[in-house]
Amino acid sequence: MRRLLLSSTGWLLVLLGVVLYPLPGPGLLVLVLGLALLSRHDPWAARRLAPLRHRALVETRRSVATWPRTLLTAVLTLALGASGLVWLADPAQPPWWPLPAWTWLPGGTWTGVGQVGSGLVGLGIVVWARARLVPARGPGDSALRAASGS
């Protein structure tokens, strides 16, 4: 029964991720989460998830490798999340908008919720990555590494 529940939830998240992928928000994250659930019981999903996991960790580590990069990543992540507040406020289409009305803030309230949620999750990932993926460097760090043989 548990396997059926995990597989059903995994497939639901994969399908939801595919639908959400072109919209602003957590489509790719939802897709990978679905694959992660499926990979617990299905070897094909684990094979597809492994390269994604590796690439995500490498790119995440790179985005927080230095303090300026960490700050830039955090600011851009917060800006993405904050842009969701525009969708939540739902302002009227401005007169200067040259495209048809249906192109003004597509997706409605739930797109805004997704963007704000993505911003918060992204900020959490930045903090986690800085703490876990970037080695601490202190004044005695090189001497300590040389003494320990690493």
Image (tube, rainbow, N blue to C red):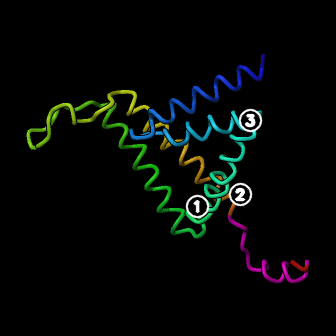
- Answer few, some or many: residues within 10 Å of disc 1's Cα (few below 14, many 20 plus, some between 14 and 19): few
Q: Secondary structure at mark 1?
A: helix
Q: Secondary structure at mark 3?
A: loop
Q: Residues within 10 Å of mark 3 (few under 14, many from 20)?
A: few
Is 55 placed left or right of 1 in the picture? left
Give the magenta part as a residue range: 134-148
Three-letter amino acid code at the position of disc 3: Asp
Residue sitting at the far top:
1
Q: Tell me the CA gap for discs 1 and 2.
A: 14 Å
* Residue identified by numbered label 2: 132
Residue indicated by mark 3: 42
- Residue 89: give x, y in percent of width and height: 29, 31
List the single residue furthest toward the left: 95
Where 9 falls versus 134 (above or below)? Answer: above
Seen from the viewer's position, the closer of residues 10 and 114 is: 10
The answer to whether residue 113 is magenta is no
Q: Earlier in the sequence, mark 2 or mark 3?
A: 3
Q: Earlier in the sequence, mark 1 or mark 3?
A: 3
Q: State which tag comes first along the sequence, 1 or 2.
A: 1
Element class at badge 2:
helix
1 vs 2, front mark:
1
